[in-house]
Amino acid sequence: MLDRADKGLSIRRQCELLGVARAGVYRLQKPANDNDLAVMRRIDELFAAWPFLGSRRITAMLKAEGETINRKRVQRLMRQMGIAALGPKPNTSKPAPGHKIHPYLLRNMAIDRPNQVWAADITYCAPRPTFGEGRMTGMQKRKEEEEK
């Protein structure tokens, strides 16, 4: 939407009207090089096989394959591809404010006969989609958007 060739409106005024920061306008993004595309393709393959891996583990796997790459580059490429590890994030074990803490009723109880105490587990594990259906990887999303 920004017109750099417009002589009537300066870039500063155009940014002001559009509500865009000038810092992101003056510097044009560099196009991705062929090496980045090859690494992104390999990261996408690794992430499709193991979606719970983060940048540290993917970096280690790429280094084991002989690629000279550092973690910051893997993080940047994963961010560009729109992928992130599936797993618990920090502070997920903190209770909500005002949450009632229930007492442990079996603390001083001696369990000495069958059927005296019962327990249940309500853990739910969602089925993992196979590759090609369900969750799309970053490269698949980008390819689909390009085809539209």
Image: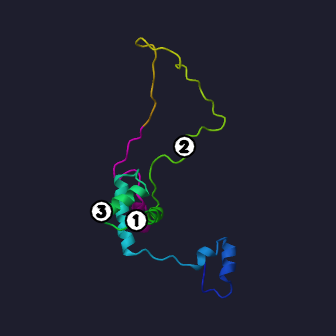
Q: Separation of disc 3 and disc 1 at Cα?
A: 26 Å
Query: Could one spot residue 28 in this view of the protein?
Result: yes
Q: Mark 3 or 2, which is nearer the eye?
A: 3
Q: Secondary structure at mark 1?
A: helix
User: Considering only vertical position in the picture, is 71 above or below 133?
Assistant: below
Q: Is residue 48 left or right of residue 88?
A: left
Q: Is residue 16 left or right of residue 129?
A: right
- Under mark 3, the amino acid is Glu
Residue density around tag 1, few if under 14, some if 14–19, many if 20 or more, within 10 Å: few
Quarter occupied by the N terminus: bottom right
Q: Separation of disc 3 and disc 2 at Cα?
A: 34 Å
Q: Secondary structure at mark 2?
A: loop
- Discs 2, 1 touching: Cβ within 8 Å: no
Give whichever of discs 2 and 1 has the lower sequence position. Answer: 2
Region in magenta: 125-148
Give whichever of discs 3 and 1 has the lower sequence position. Answer: 3
State the mark number for residue 65. 3
Label 2 belongs to which residue?
92
Q: Is residue 131 magenta?
A: yes
Give whichever of discs 3 and 2 has the lower sequence position. Answer: 3
Q: Is residue 79 left or right of residue 94?
A: left
State the mark number for residue 143. 1
Question: 23 or 67, which lies in front?
Answer: 67
Quarter occupied by the C terminus: bottom left
Q: Is residue 137 magenta?
A: yes
Name the colour scheme. Answer: rainbow
Residue extending farthest to the top is 113
Residue at 58% across / 24% down in the picture? 103
- Under mark 1, the amino acid is Lys
Q: Position of residue 105 (x, y in %)?
A: 55, 20
Q: Position of residue 61 (x, y in %)?
A: 34, 58
Which image quarter: residue 13? bottom right
